[in-house]
Image: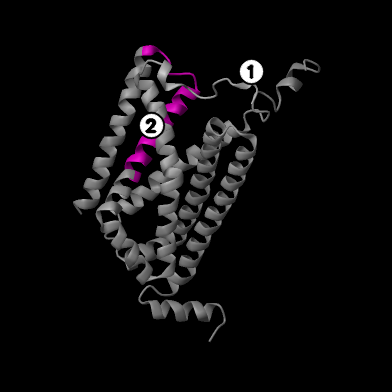
Amino acid sequence: MAATNNRPLSPHLQVWRWGPAMLVSILHRVTGNGLAIVGMAVLLYWLGSLASGPQAYEAFLAHAGKWYGKVVLVGLTWAFFNHMASGIRHFVLDIGAGFELKSNAAWSVFTPLAAIAATVLTWAAILLK
Amino acid sequence: MGNGTSIGRVRGHGSAHSGTHHWLLQRYTAFGNLVLGLWLLFSLVTLKDYQFETVASWAAGPVAALGLALFVISTFWHARLGLQVVIEDYVHEPANKVAAMTLLNLVTFAAIAAGLFFILRLQIVGTASSVSGGMVKSALQSMMGGR
């Protein structure tokens, strides 16, 4: 590639001072990719095992009940809520609102905290049934 | 560059050469994901348990099957749009970029097809029988016109 083409396409973490908006942006991409790859695979495994009958579904439940299965399911729940919260933040930013420094920082701190709270509430509802 | 009317220059261009098409699709599917994702989560949390009979008979219902199908299409499409941006950001070699985009499109179509097939199969089999594997098999065979 020619030297003149050698310009950065993506944010360079080393040269920017960290702030809450940056964390939310990075978490949005990380959780989005996690959901796209791991979430897609788990969803298809779940649907496929349901469609294959009780035996296959029991095998799915066995994996889901092991420690790694719980880590994946809780992780996907958190990723879903985090991506949802920062996605709603994107909708708000899309209409041109929320760019003032203070409110931008406040909502950037709020979105990951709301995602953690929603994850805890969801699993409490499942486990306390 | 610079010829034509101002709307002619703007339409379908910009740095991506596709206008706002990708950006808008990402938002449309995001809204679908928001509604369908919350519906799916609420449905799963409120199921009385996660045994095969409970989950299969729920998923085989017409509303749940349609919702699941829409969820698969909307989320997998959205995932494809998002992964495309990651490839554009981090894969710089043109040949690798073409290969990655080809793989992404094939995987997305395969994943959507698989998801819809599973839902349809569950719809056919799940309503016919949710008691045992043997009954499921015979129900499927009779539906397919087999022995």
| Label 2 close to label 1 by CB (< 8 Å) | no
Local SS, label 1: helix
Q: Residue at x 56, y 78 (%)?
A: B144
Q: Are both tags, 2 and 1, on one chain?
A: yes
Determine the main secondary structure of the stretch shown in magenta: helix
Q: Which residue is mark 2?
A: A27
Figure quadrant of residue A50: bottom left
Q: CA distance from mark 2 to mark 1?
A: 31 Å
Q: Amino acid at mark 2?
A: Leu
The answer to whether one can see residue A20 in this image is: yes
Q: Is residue B129 left or right of residue B108?
A: left
Write the start and end of the magenta stretch as one range.
A76-101
Q: Residue at x 32, y 67 (%)?
A: A58
User: What residue type is disc 1 on?
Assistant: Thr
Q: Is the residue B99 above or below the residue B44 in the image?
A: above
Q: Position of residue A66 (x, y in %)?
A: 26, 57
Chain ID, mark 2:
A
Q: Is residue B124 above or below residue A20?
A: below
Label 1 marks a residue whose chain is: A
Please give the name of the residue rendered at 38% of the width and 31% of the height, measured from the top-left corner.
A27
